[in-house]
Image: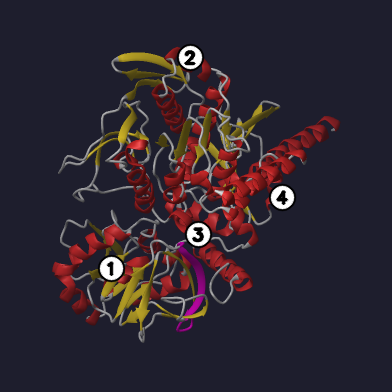
Amino acid sequence: MKNVELLFPELCNIYGESYSVTYLQRCNPENINVIETNHKSVPAFVSQDVDMIYLGCMTERKQEMVLKALRPYKERIQELIDKNVIFLITGNAIELFGKEIRDEDRRIECLGLFDFYSVRYMKRERHNSQFIGHYGDLTMLGHRSQFSFAYGDFDNNFIDIERGIGMNPDTQKEGIHVNNFFATYSLGPFLILNPYFTKEILGRLGLDQKLCFEKEIIEAYDYRLAELRRTINAGGRL
Amino acid sequence: MLRFYFALWVSKLAMWVLKLRGSTEDDRPGLLANKICPDFLAKIAKPPLVITVTGTNGKSTTTALLNNKLVAEGKKVSFNEWGANMNAGYAVNLMRCVNIFNKPVYDVSILEADERLLDTTMGMIKPNYILVTNICKDSLRRNGHPEFIFDIINRTFEELGDHTTAILNANDPISSQLAPHSRRVYYGMTDIGANPFENRVKDIAVCPKCGSLIKYHYRIYRHIGDFYCPDCDFKTPQAKYYVSACDLKNRKMTIVEDGEATEYPLISDAVYNVYNVLSCIAVLRELGEPKQEIADFMKTQQVTKIRETCVEYNGIKYYTYGTKSQNVSAASTVFEYMAKEPSDKDLVFLLDEMQDVNHPTETLTWLYETDYEFLNSPNIKRIIVGGHMFLNHKLRLLLAGVPEDRIVCIENEADIPKYVERTGIQKVYVLFEIDFVSKAFHMRDAIVEKCKEEDKKNEKR
């Protein structure tokens, strides 16, 4: 049995992204156990071995609540990354793993596990775009809808963007990938949007790679990829 | 002021030219006025009464009811019934209220206001009342999330201070917390036995004061209900206008105000429309309108045609039903209604957003925020989906547990009518994205036409 910890769904499911975990479990319900952890509880990963940890997008105020909940376990998170535990981090949850979030004059200290910072632009129009990118042999699709961007070198990026933008409008590097730690600004739900990557995750969990409604999800992915190739411009705008 | 008068005159001339051409529902003169004079909305004189209605859902229905009532009693009311709810629309609305010398000639302006832009406009307009219907999940691309919208509306009230009365939904744990420094009037509802389904994605889950999970004595729909926090003093405020009983089937409710109960008619059997009528009554009562007069007026009202229509042919009713696709709360609420409305029915989805037709790469996030699970109901016989998102809808419906033999997903919307079957159904609902009213009418008519042709062929045989 593989334990997948879904962190703080009461705070971090604002766009239904927890469905990535729901879908993963439906691919192999006999062998995947989902542990849902409330932000006022001690995460399961602190005291037991889990196989995968998922954290999704949240509001700006909730970022600070989640930081408060995770800060005591910063070293443990680093240890789990080093031990090749799978992490999937989506949306603005990625910002929590950098050094700080800048919001006008405020500086919000983050976990500092990776060398980058984020800047909120709450008074600007919300940024919406899509991307096509590559992770190894896989063609990845992404959708971002956000008030902020991240800045840094991103030498360990997750996805190389082919069309669209990366962590900010001036880079084609998207997300973070270290060992089995995968983080991206993309919403989705990410594992629905990227069925081949879902297979990859199932494989890394040591499970059969058969997907739930495999024919239908692959057809939807192929159609979307073709549609995006026709319509998306270099900046990711539609 | 010279620039303002130039803007007023040029825009009024443009309005007049458009009117001559038969186009009265056009906000381009407002666009022009704001361009010539950026503080046009501040400088234009206001009528004696300005009412703004904002919030995620229910604005159009509520403003239409308010307008109809005030017009019915002979007041001159400026109202953008076509839903122009941004700066240019406000400018047109207010321009109508004044003559060329900037003197008010109307009694009332009713502004349906987009909540996203409230803080950049209402400080200039300074309405007497702002009614906030609710704050729910909406399009993530434009509105972000409810906390973001809350902050915008709250900034607006902070700026307006004592000048504006806030009329708020006591049962909404989000919008009820607005305007702490303004005069607040609440409307609310008792437990009407609505038994709402649980939503996959919550509009609000934790207490904004202490972070504990919010609890409910009862819910009406989504996050709307009698809420409290088990760990602090966060709870439903007391409502001045309180629905003490509601009979959806017979379309009537009782509102208690200062201890006195009055019965009012409802305009539909949908629970969210109870709040639309209730909030409208709250505003009218604040204006001093007599209770019985309001009750008599409500008997004459129905849901606006841009939201719902019905034609009947050969024993089956064919509806168009506004659904607001990427507005997650509205779509889920409609799906819940479709499951609970007991008729056996077919559903047709026309839910692609207008902006996505020209750029056909709509995101699929909203499908997983919306409760497609509600559609797995035995009275929903078939779900027919057309458009470029057809494969995504199919996957989502399958994941929601809808049996495959009840799902028809096709790329070309024009082919939809041939998949509508009449055996064993009483109703067909065309659920449409509200920017596509005429497209929905055409689809409904095409379905009816196809049925008529089938009947003709059968008669010949």
Q: Which residue position is annotated with label 2?
A: B293
Q: CA distance from mark 1 to mark 3?
A: 35 Å
Which chain does the numbered disc 4 sit on? B
Q: Chain of mark 3?
A: B
Discs 3 and 4 carry the same chain letter: yes
Give the left or right position of residue B448, taking residue B209 as reference: right
Q: Residues within 10 Å of mark 1 (few under 14, many from 20)?
A: few
Using the image, name the chain to which the residue with label 1 belongs: A
Which quadrant of the rendered structure holds the C terminus of chain A? bottom right
Q: Measure the alpha-carbon separation of dots 4 and 1.
A: 54 Å
The kind of residue on which mark 2 rests is: Glu
Mark 2 surroundings: few (<14), some (14-19) or many (≥20) residues within 10 A: few
Please name whichever residue, B192 or B65, is drawn nearer the observer in this view of the structure: B65
Q: Give the image quarter of residue B164.
A: top left
Q: Which residue is mark 1?
A: A105
Mark 1 or 3, closer to the camera: 1
Give the x, y percent position of residue B61: 52, 33
- Residue B93 in magenta? no
Q: Amino acid at mark 4?
A: Ala
Quick check: do tags 1 and 3 share a chain?
A: no
Task: Note whether residue B284 is visible.
Answer: yes
Determine the CA span between mark 3 and mark 4: 22 Å
The CA span between labels 2 and 4 is 47 Å
First in residue order: circle 2 vs circle 4: 2
As drawn, which residue projects farthest toward the bottom?
A155
In the picture of the structure, the residue carrying the numbered disc 3 is B364
